[in-house]
Image (tube, rainbow, N blue to C red):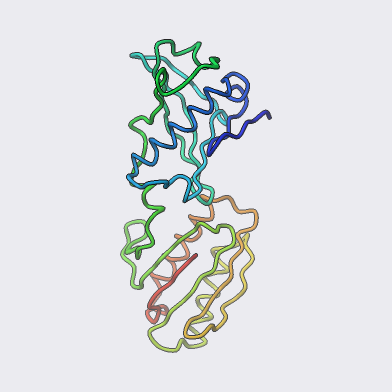
Amino acid sequence: MESNDIGWATFYNDASTGFSEEFQTEMSKQLMDKFNTMVEIQNFAQDKKFMLFVGMTELKTIYQNGYALSSVEVIAPPAYSNKLTAYWKSDDLETITKSDSISSENIEFGWCSDFDKEFFKSFARKDIIPEVDGINLNFEFIADLQLFPDLSITYQFKSEPTEKQLEHIKKTLVSNFTESYISGITPFESTYVTMLDFQGTEGNKGLKQIEQFIQDLNSNENNRNIEMITIN
């Protein structure tokens, strides 16, 4: 598979060979600038290590009302793929893709209405997550998954946990993270910690497993002693 890396973008297949390097460069730059503008956070794409994939999946480019619309992917940390639509606008939508004379003066790139601003902005937050899948949590939950697949789970309790309580959490870990390395639950200062390595688990699947783990803990009476769980 042919590819070309420019800034935060990687161009694959037809986009790698069919778009001039100047077109790729301007596309990468303008789409990053528009990304940061739309989430209203300066340098957000760079700082949070978002990646733009163009041509990894079929572009499905269409031309309408003076715009070219193409399907691209933004990879959100750690590995969440989001398909969305990018556009470009110029006097000649098709031949400009091969031009070696491109600047913001003769082409405009941007994002279409399927750009989910709130989803992307959520990666800036480290606030307490009050609910999972619409269910209110009985303990405070904070998640920062930028280091996926190598994460740690820290448990804070209202009072010293019993062996029965720790054993239940361990069983819940094992039942949810079936493909992962789990270190067990180790005392650390005033907390307890589990090291979790998702190994070959794909990002979206790992996220679902985390959500289910939190839901399972939340629904069991044995875990009313949990004050906070932090995953990072």
Closer-to-camera residue (34/115) = 34
- Relative image position of residue 25 (x, y in whole percent): 53, 28
- Relative image position of residue 86 (x, y in whole percent): 42, 28
Classify residue 63 by image quadrant. top left
Residue at image coords 38%, 35%: 34
Classify residue 100 by image quadrant. top right
Residue at image coords 53%, 76%: 193
Residue at image coords 44%, 13%: 93
Quarter of the image where the N terminus is located: top right
Residue at image coords 41%, 17%: 106
Examine the rendered structure and indicate whether residue 111 appears above or below residue 97.
below
> As drawn, is 110 to the left or to the right of 23?
left
- Relative image position of residue 119 (x, y in whole percent): 37, 47
Examine the rendered structure and indicate whether residue 139 appears above or below residue 36.
below
Examine the rendered structure and indicate whether residue 123 appears above or below residue 101.
below
Count how many numbered circles sit on residues in the image.
Answer: 0
- Relative image position of residue 102 (x, y in whole percent): 48, 19
Examine the rendered structure and indicate whether residue 70 appears above or below residue 50.
above
Closer-to-camera residue (24/212) = 24
Residue that sits furthest to the right in the current view: 1
